[in-house]
Image: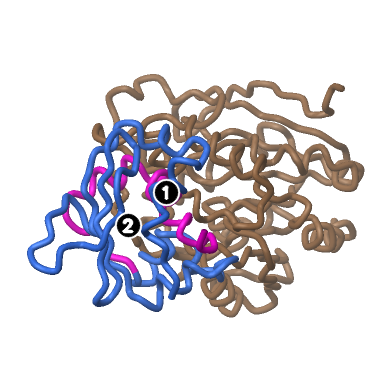
Chain colours: A blue, B brown
Amino acid sequence: MPMNFAALPARAAAAPGLARWGRHLNATVLVEAGDRAWTLVVRDGVLISADPAAAIMPRFDLALRFAPDGLARFLTSPPPPGWHDLMALMRNGALRVEGNVQPFMAHLFWFKGVLALLREPAA
Amino acid sequence: MIEPIIGRYLRLDLEGRPHRVYVEEAGQGIPLLLLHTAGSDGRQWRHLMNDAAVTDRFRCIAFDMPWHGKSSPPEGWQGEEYRLTTAAYTGMALAVSAALGLDRPLVMGCSIGGRIVLDLAAGHAEAVRGVIGLQSSAFVAPYYDTEWLHHPHAHGGEVCAGVVSGLIAPTAPEADRWETLWHYMQGGPGVFRGDLHFYKGEGDLRPRLAGIDTKRCPVVLLSGEYDYSCRPEDTLATAAAVPGAEAVIMKGLGHFPMSEDYAALRVHLLPALARFDSIS
């Protein structure tokens, strides 16, 4: 499954309005899919980095834990019905949001917008 | 350009309390009462009410539920928590119909509106000539914590719109997607959550379905495939429990077909409306 996390900060910076939706978002977010994981560092709505997470004792404020097959369906373009949105994945049991849920619920447009950018073809 | 939609305020009692309800209408003919979704208002129907293919045959009436849109909450609202119930919602639809002098309207609702038309069909077939449920199901199980919809640590407008944003089909026109979401961003504090008290809890209408006689009150259910709140299988299960009910799963549409992509809905809606032309 292609997931270009390395390009995600640049794509997020180029997405119109995305930083505004997250203008008060400051968080370290673990994104996990099976045995792979990344750490997103967000400051004032700007995605500073999206690097592979530390293998041992990764630190984060909240974690988005995806079922790998659910994330793969989410990343198809266009995504199929029922797998096209983070909350659709939650409904299907393919995403668990853990830790401090408040930044996620208070900035839903930011989280949905950033992860949808992974659908774009690799630069 | 001036649109044909006109709006007025209706004064009536609901559950024994005086209310001021905003009502829009357009067209002439068979009365068609339109019910909006939870946390939104009657503006969702503006495309339909500008469609001459509908308004040439139907008198379309969309009202904002109390607490929604331009309808005020009742006096004393500041001291209570808004919670929609089946009885209040059914009573409201019947009261508005009676206050406007409608003769057995066709009732079309979406989401919570698609739910309550099932109660109207089951218990008030004498008062309606038929029902159309968009994104209609008898029950939806909770799949997120609705406490966040009215919480001081999340902006109410943004979280309500953010929660429902994924219910819109990816193929919906951008302008219509964001107008649909804007309506959610304008909802009053706790109102969307109060509607969901009915939708995800109190308003389980599965026991009512057996009481629907589609010979007296025809039932048509139209649901978009991208809706993961009222899923296609939920609509199909509801239709299966109502002998004679018709159900169509609509490609490329989500939870808000009338506002997110009216052109795509229209393909399915006009034939559904046509069958009610001949029912008096």
Q: Are marks 1 and 2 in contact (CB under 8 Å)?
A: yes
Could you say where residue A62 lies in the image, as x and y percent from the top left?
20, 53
The residue lying at 53 percent from left, 70 percent from top is A76
- Answer with mark 1 or mark 2, whichever residue precedes in sequence: 2
Q: Residues within 10 Å of mark 1 (few under 14, many from 20)?
A: many
Is B73 or B98 nearer to us in this picture? B73
Q: Which residue is mark 2?
A: B144
Q: Is residue B16 magenta?
A: no
Q: Is residue A34 left or right of residue A13?
A: left
Parent chain of label 1? B
Vertically, is A58 above or below A68? above
* Label 2 element class: loop
The residue lying at 42 percent from left, 50 percent from top is A114
* Label 1 element class: helix
Q: Which residue is mark 1?
A: B163
Q: Is residue B231 left or right of residue B74?
A: right
Could you say where residue A59 lies in the image, as x and y percent from the top left?
12, 55
The residue lying at 43 percent from left, 45 percent from top is A12
Could you say where residue B145 lies in the image, as x and y percent from the top left?
28, 53
Is residue B84 in sight in this rendering?
A: no
Is B239 or B160 nearer to us in this picture? B160
Vertically, is B63 above or below B73? below
Is B35 or B166 nearer to us in this picture? B166
Could you say where residue B85 lies in the image, as x and y percent from the top left?
41, 47
Q: Quadrant of residue B193?
A: top left
Magenta part of the protein: which range?
Answer: A95-123
Q: Type of residue at label 1?
A: Val
